[in-house]
Amino acid sequence: MSALLSALAGACVWAGGMVPFNAARFAALQAEDRTAVLYFFSANCGVCPQQEEALKRIAAEPGPLTPTVFQITFVPADEVCRRYEVTAPSTLIIFRGKSVIGRSAGLFTEDEIRQFIEGARFRSRARPKPRPKRTYRPKR
């Protein structure tokens, strides 16, 4: 019985929500090909409080397509900020699996953020897998 409860609790963690950044949890979501949003914020950012409230409401919605939102404090010298080339707070990066499917800075209303996430998710579904480059041979 306790194994079932712990499995259900683990499933709830992956179903969405707003959590502090954890590299192991982020890698597990990428391996499952789930949607994740990296949210870079700063304490002295004017847009960040509005953006955070909107993201909390979006992340709290029930459903299989609800993204998990990872909060990361914006510090330009931080390794995570350099890895994802983030140069300003209030930046959102959307991942599906290991692919970046969207990147934006400065969105703060719930409607804008929702459109951005859903649009990135929709556009990423139709992308074909990259093909290897063909060698060009001239005709003779």
Image (spheres, rainbow, N blue to C red):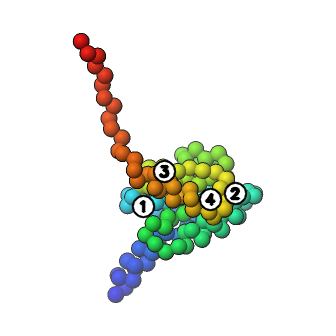
Name the residue tied to disc 3: 101
Q: Answer with left or right where residue 51 lies relative to residue 36.
A: right
Q: Give percent across and percent down for residue 52.
A: 65, 65
Name the residue tied to disc 2: 42
Using the image, tell me which numbered label, if any, was put on residue 112: 4
Q: Please tell me how crowded label 2 is: few (under 14), some (14-19), or many (20+) other residues with Cα within 10 Å.
A: some
Identify the amino acid type marked 2: Ser
Distance from disc 3 to disc 1, alpha carbons, whole Å, reads 12 Å
Q: Give percent across and percent down for residue 72.
A: 60, 58
Q: Answer with left or right where residue 140 lies relative to residue 22.
A: left
Name the residue tied to disc 1: 34
Q: Secondary structure at mark 1?
A: loop
From this view, report whether residue 41 is shown above or below residue 12: above
Are circles 2 and 4 on residues that touch, CB within 8 Å? no
Identify the amino acid type marked 1: Arg
Identify the amino acid type marked 4: Glu
Are circles 3 and 1 on residues that touch, CB within 8 Å? no
Distance from disc 1 to disc 2, alpha carbons, whole Å, reads 26 Å
Q: Is residue 119 visible?
A: yes
Sooner in the amino-acid sequence: mark 3 or mark 4: 3
The residue positioned 44% from the left and 51% from the top of the image is 124
Q: Give percent across and percent down for residue 62.
A: 49, 74
